[in-house]
């Protein structure tokens, strides 16, 4: 499709033009982001209806996150080489078709495969929307608009379980509409952007796509996450399977690093991520990613499986986190735009995030809901203050020609944090739950082997006999705190990285000045 004539780089879009295009960008980003978590509360129903297993439970979420993570840097690099608007329209099409396919899945194998394809569209939309916004708006003004962006992304991430619970509990809809609901909104966003989006496209004649590096990165991450899923369950930590999978994954990533250092157009440019600000921002983003995805997925499961609430009630109980994210991202975005300083908000956000995780690490099956809500507000506020400001910090340190690659890199590592979070925390939770169920069965005088044959491993708690129901529910409730203690440890690393960030003062121009040219003054 041919894009309308774009304004010249020296003629920035007016506020009205920006808001018209931004409405379509935020709509499609909201739908893409919410698709990552909308299934979290409905997963027990989905996996039960499709006759799936416990290991498949986590992979319904992980498959889309993994595909999104692996493809994000590729889309970011393509945005530096081809029409940003055309790429955005293609990614909307991929996402829309795969969402339909997920809704029609007949077993968990099909659903996981379609979710992986959906993840390709999700990864594209997440990075391309940020790249397009960066191409339309100068960094100094971007903080104000990034407040809207961060709020939409965070509300979509945390609000997904609420919407999924409502859909799953509505008899005339059912869980399949967790996927169908995305289709009409993507159609609307497609035509809105076709009409309102005007961005400058610079096609370079010497285009080189790093397919080898992209394949090695995807393969390395995939092998390691599959190993994390099955270790200490299907095979031991010290086994030939661990050596083959962990060692093989590490070797693939080492090979990917070498390829990225020698190819002309790397998907993850090492000269960008080696710099102090991008490197530290990437480390901090790993912690934020774990908070976004791990928090929403496993808190929803905690309320439903560990405390006995319905899907709708479980979704409603995640609202404190959503409010924390929405308020903090909006306020901090405006304050960053006004002051031009980014680092203080990232540091405070990382600390608040850590404190929130420490609060969640104390929960069990009897923790008062008010205490849980307080900890969730802190986690949400930490995510809101740090998530988009980390993107803003890294975008402010690279020239316009590297904007797509830099944005893709930080989005890649944030998504990687979420993928690792869901996989690792899911594995930890499964092991703790299994141990808790066995302990509860022994205390009740029940043989664990006979109980397992009777179906105590099912995710449909309500279908269990009363003695088993209480034991399984208690095991889930008590195990959840352990995974958030692990998350708090990762968040501490994010705090350290944020403290060592260089102070960043936002620039007024879209691009960095050429070498030898004086820097443009920054408004105070």
Image (tube, rainbow, N blue to C red):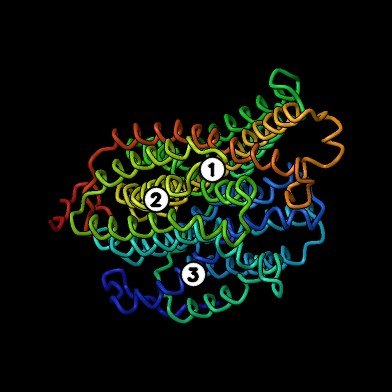
> Image quadrant for the N terminus?
bottom right
Q: Which residue is mark 2?
A: 377
From the image, which quarter does the C terminus lie in?
A: bottom left
Residue 45 location, quadrant: bottom right
Q: How far apart, in angstroms, are the residues tagged by discs 2 and 3?
A: 36 Å
Residue 33, percent from left and from top: 53, 60
Judge the density around disc 3: few (<14), some (14-19), many (≥20) Cα neighbours within 10 Å. Answer: many
Q: What label does residue 85 carry, if any?
A: 3
Q: Residues within 10 Å of mark 1 (few under 14, many from 20)?
A: many
Does residue 502 sit above or below 71 in this rendering? above
Position of residue 118 in the picture relative to residue 366 (left or right): right
Q: Secondary structure at mark 3?
A: helix
Specify the quadrant of the image occupied by residue 13.
bottom left
Residue 258 found in image quarter: top right
Q: Is residue 108 above or below residue 19?
A: above
| Residue highlighted by disc 1 | 416
Across and down, in percent, residue 359 comes to 42, 38
Horizontal relation, residue 361 to residue 254: left or right: left
Q: Nearer the viewer, mark 3 or mark 1?
A: 1
């Amino acid at each position: 499709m041919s894009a309308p004539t774009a304004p010249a780089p020296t003629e920035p879009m007016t506020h009205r033009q920006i808001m018209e295009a931004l409405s379509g960008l935020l709509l499609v980003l909201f739908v893409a982001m919410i698709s990552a978590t909308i299934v979290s509360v409905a997963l027990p129903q989905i996996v039960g209806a499709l006759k799936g297993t416990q290991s498949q439970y986590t992979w319904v979420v992980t498959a889309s996150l993994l595909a999104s993570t692996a493809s994000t840097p590729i889309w970011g690099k393509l945005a530096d080489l081809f029409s940003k608007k055309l790429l955005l329209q293609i990614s909307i099409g991929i996402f829309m078709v795969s969402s339909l396919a997920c809704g029609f899945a007949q077993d968990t194998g099909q659903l996981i495969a379609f979710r992986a394809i959906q993840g390709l569209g999700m990864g594209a939309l997440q990075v391309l929307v940020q790249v397009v916004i960066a191409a339309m708006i100068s960094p100094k003004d971007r903080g104000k608009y990034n407040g809207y962006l961060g709020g939409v992304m965070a509300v979509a991430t945390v609000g997904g379980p609420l919407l999924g619970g409502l859909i799953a509990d509505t008899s005339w809809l059912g869980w399949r509409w967790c996927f169908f609901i995305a289709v009409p909104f993507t159609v609307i966003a497609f035509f809105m952007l076709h009409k309102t989006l005007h961005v400058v496209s610079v096609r370079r004649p010497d285009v080189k796509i790093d397919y080898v590096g992209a394949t090695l990165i995807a393969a390395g991450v995939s092998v390691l996450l599959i190993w994390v899923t099955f270790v200490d369950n299907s095979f031991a930590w010290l086994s030939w399977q661990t050596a083959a999978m962990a060692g093989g994954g590490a070797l693939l990533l080492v090979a990917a690093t070498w390829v990225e250092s020698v190819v002309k157009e790397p998907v993850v440019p090492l000269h960008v991520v080696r710099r102090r600000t991008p490197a530290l921002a990437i480390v901090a983003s790993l912690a934020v990613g774990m908070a976004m995805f791990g928090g929403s997925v496993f808190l929803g499961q905690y309320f439903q499986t560990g405390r006995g609430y319905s899907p709708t009630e479980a979704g409603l109980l995640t609202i404190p986190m959503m409010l924390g994210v929405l308020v903090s991202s909006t306020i901090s975005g405006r304050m960053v735009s006004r002051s031009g300083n980014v680092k203080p908000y990232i540091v405070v956000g990382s600390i608040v995030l850590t404190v929130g995780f420490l609060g969640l690490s104390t929960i069990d099956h009897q923790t008062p809901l008010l205490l849980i809500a307080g900890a969730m507000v802190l986690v949400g506020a930490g995510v809101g203050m740090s998530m988009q400001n980390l993107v803003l910090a890294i975008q402010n340190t690279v020239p316009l020609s590297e904007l797509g690659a830099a944005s893709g890199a930080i989005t890649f590592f944030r998504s990687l944090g979420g993928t690792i979070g869901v996989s690792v925390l899911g594995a930890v939770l499964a092991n703790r739950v299994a141990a808790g169920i066995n302990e509860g069965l022994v205390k009740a005088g029940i043989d664990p082997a006979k109980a397992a044959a009777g179906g105590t491993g099912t995710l449909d708690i309500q279908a269990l006999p009363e003695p088993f129901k209480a034991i399984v529910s208690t095991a889930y409730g008590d195990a959840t705190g352990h995974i958030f203690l692990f998350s708090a440890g990762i968040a501490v690393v994010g705090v350290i990285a944020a403290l060592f960030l260089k102070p960043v003062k936002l620039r007024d121009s879209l691009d960095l000045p050429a070498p030898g040219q004086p820097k443009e003054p920054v408004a105070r």
